[in-house]
Image (cartoon, rainbow, N blue to C red):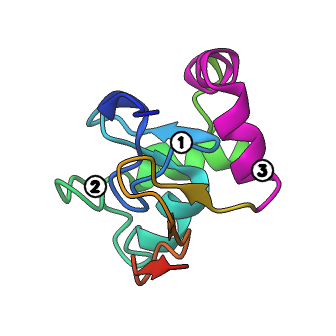
Amino acid sequence: YTLPDDCLCPVCLEIFMEPVTLPCSHTFCKACFLESVDKATLCCPLCRRRVSTWARLNSRTNSLVNQQLWQQIQDQFPLQCQRRLSGQDAVDDDHPGTQTSHNAQSGVELIT
């Protein structure tokens, strides 16, 4: 089963988990955003637009996650969300026997 591109995080290439949509309209998993954002300048990992004021404000009000998109993804893809939330690797349907690691830093595919 192939997920639509607008539901995939550009960092980990998996379905969004707690999506964070930045003012520049780029969206990431919350964990991927927190791992990949430049801590010193707080810039978008894709376009490098500064998001420091936005990030500080939304962190303080606990509203980093795009709740509307997160609910939509959970409603449309409950199985995929459950697999990610439970820590199971997603099976790559295009390559049977292949599992994709959720390690956002390396992006390495593990062949099983």
List the single residue furthest toward the left: 47
Q: Is residue 16 visible?
A: yes
**Image quadrant for the C terminus?**
bottom right
From what the image shows, is residue 91 above or below residue 101? above
Q: Is residue 71 magenta?
A: yes
From what the image shows, is residue 28 above or below residue 25? below
Q: What secondary structure do most residues of the magenta stretch adopt?
A: helix
The quadrant holding residue 108 is: bottom left
- Residue drawn at the location 69% of the way across and 51% of the way down: 84
Q: Secondary structure at mark 3?
A: helix
Q: Which residue is mark 1?
A: 16
List the single residue furthest toward the front: 96
Q: Is residue 63 magenta?
A: no
From what the image shows, is residue 89 above or below residue 71? below
Q: Is residue 62 visible?
A: no
Label 1, residues with CA under 10 Å away: few <14, some 14-19, many ≥20: many
- Mark 1 or mark 2, which is nearer the start of the sequence? 1
- Residue 19's spot in the image, x, y percent? 55, 39
List the single residue furthest toward the right: 86
The amino acid sitting under disc 1 is Phe
